[in-house]
Image: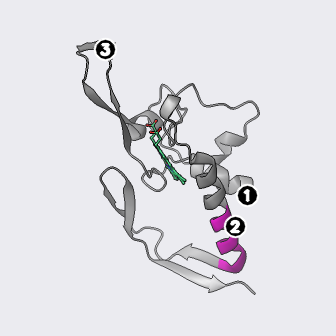
Amino acid sequence: MLDKIDRVFKDDKTRPITEIVNTFPRCLEKPEEIAGYKWPANTHVRISIDAIHHNNEYWEDPENFNPDRWMVEGFEPKKNSFITFGGGLRVCPGRKLAMVELVSLMALLFRKYEIDLANKEAPLKTVSALITACTELSIEIRKRN
Ligand code: HEM
């Protein structure tokens, strides 16, 4: 159960459900060539988590929500292709705590309650700036016996 929750969170292909942070910034210390273009020092760039997580150069069938891809023996995302928590020197220091919190919260909730979407066809309403937040999601909650 717990590792299933972990996989659901990681397989954020059903954007924007779990793509909490959309982009993260970097500033070029020296001139660089990126994506075939030359950029001067001090250029500010934003790395799009969404674009990388939905790029089929890095992910097989990226639009398909498939938490079980994480179960395939030996499966490892390609280098720098799973960046929910960023990467490199500035990788999120709270990532392990965040995963423990998410998994614990889900386990506590689902142990006590059955939770379903009120309308499975209803579009997910979100607002996105630096982070994505859900603005409306009708659910039905029943206490488990
Ligand atoms: C699901 C929850 C979270 C997500 C998706 C998330 C995501 C991120 C991302 C994408 C970055 C930028 C990394 C980069 O620039 O390479 C970041 C940085 C950071 N996060 Fe998180 N984070 C989460 C939870 C947390 C928690 C729980 C803490 C603290 C307890 C935390 C503390 C930080 C700090 C301090 C930085 C700045 C690190 C630096 O610039 O060196 N985050 N996070």
Three-letter code, disc 1: Leu
Q: Please, what secondary structure does the residue beneath circle 3 have?
A: loop
Residue at 43 percent across and 33 percent down: it is 52
Residue 20, visible in the rendered structure:
yes
Q: Earlier in the sequence, mark 1 or mark 3?
A: 1
Q: Is residue 90 above or below residue 99?
A: above
Three-letter code, disc 2: Ala
Tell me if label 1 and label 3 are in contact, CB under 8 Å. Answer: no
Residue at 73 percent across and 37 percent down: it is 72
Q: Which mark is residue 2?
A: 1
Query: Which corner quadrant holds the C terminus?
Result: bottom right
Q: Please, what secondary structure does the residue beneath circle 1 have?
A: helix
Q: Earlier in the sequence, mark 1 or mark 2?
A: 1
Residue at 64 percent across and 66 percent down: it is 106
Q: Which contiguous range is marked in magenta?
A: 104-113
Q: Is residue 134 left or right of residue 59?
A: left
Instruction: Please state which of the two labelled residues, at mark 1 or mark 3, is closer to the viewer.
Output: 3
Q: Residue 143 location, x and y as percent?
A: 66, 86
Real-space Cα separation, disc 1 to disc 3, in angstroms: 44 Å
Q: Which mark is residue 107?
A: 2
The residue that mark 3 highlights is 30
Residue 124, visible in the rendered structure:
no
Q: Residue 111 location, x and y as percent?
A: 72, 74
Viewer-side residue, 31 vs 36: 31
Q: Is mark 1 within 8 Å of ligand 1?
A: no
Check if residue 5 falls in the magenta segment. no
Three-letter code, disc 3: Lys
Tell me if label 1 and label 2 are in contact, CB under 8 Å. Answer: yes
